[in-house]
Amino acid sequence: MPLDSSCELALPKGIVHPGYRLGFDLGGTKSEAALLECRADGRVRVVQRRRIPTPRDAGYDAVLASTAGFLLEIAREAPVSLDDLPIGVGMPGGVRRRDGTVKNSNTTCLNGRPFRTDLQARVGRRLLFDNDANCFALAEALLGAARSASEGVVFGVIMGTGVGGGVVFGGRVWSGLQGIAGEWGHHAVYATPADAEESLRPCYCGQRGCLETYASGTAVERDYEARTGKKLRLAEIATLRGSDPAAAACIECLVDAFGRGLANLIDMLDPSMVVLGGGVSNLDLLLDEGVERVRERVFNDELTTPIVRHELGDSAGVLGAALLGMVG
Ligand SMILES: [Zn+2]
């Protein structure tokens, strides 16, 4: 969706936190900030939104300086002091609880470095941080497709180059004891005898059979290339499935893994709503055939869980970052 001062956003009834909030979404190639005004009637106005390139090739210090400078610049446009402006930062990867260093970020110069502490020192105040999947889930729960379920548990799914997810309960992100809540992309959806484990696809995390190795866009494209020697994009593979047996087989792998993975997730969490995001979620077949596979496998004689497509698109990351900590 377009995200500017003309777009209509509103918080769910009962959640009223008037004031200004600043969100920052640190991406691999570009980063984005959005200044929001949350009004007393629950409406949310996008006061300012701006993007900058992420100077990741220039290294850690450059990313740090660029991020801090950009945050301070946008913060000056809020009609409140820096101390009175909640600031949230969303980024891929997580933070090690034991020493505060970044892990699993695709902006690899951040990995192993105390980005959170260093950025707070540069900006001169406390910041709220979370990973991009949790920010996506929070934005969809409070301003997007899952607003009607915001009092319950919302599971936000990201299926793109990888498979991730975030859990939001009552309008708050549930990060988990170790900060890995929602990481459903790395649960194995296929089992095999120990002596035949090689038949399962290997994952960069060190395991085999992870959902991500079957249900990400990258996985489907690799599968198609392995079967045919041709490189095609996911949407093209999906379009060809009626006439190309290799494409049909690749999509079958995707739909089967999605059904198994999401049924497992629903068995354990029984969320009030599931919101699908990321490039793979643009495939209509996920919402009909995919959901049917979930229905076949879930531990219940019916599936009443609403499984819906995202509403906020690319804007969810920065909106979710701005909303971090709003519901305390
Ligand atoms: Zn894995």
Image (tube, rainbow, N blue to C red):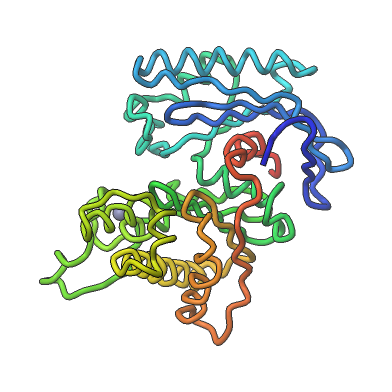
Task: Please identify the quarter of the rendering in which residue 109 is found.
Answer: top left
The furthest residue to the right: 41
Q: Residue at x 42, y 58 (%)?
A: 184
Q: Residue at x 49, y 40 (%)?
A: 131
Residue 143: horizontal and vertical position, in percent? 71, 47
Left-right relation of 221 to 268: left
Q: Reply above or below: 240 against 71.
A: below
Q: Residue at x 33, y 64 (%)?
A: 247
Quadrant where the N terminus is found in the figure: top right
Left-right relation of 91 to 137: left
The furthest residue to the front: 243
Left-right relation of 68 to 197: right
Q: Reply above or below: 322 against 60.
A: below
Depth check, front residue: 55 or 152: 55
Residue 263: horizontal and vertical position, in percent? 47, 72
The furthest residue to the left: 195
Quadrant where the C terminus is found in the figure: top right
For ligand 1, give the image quadrant: bottom left
Depth check, front residue: 32 or 72: 32
Q: Residue at x 57, y 23 (%)?
A: 51
User: Tag count in the figure?
Assistant: 0
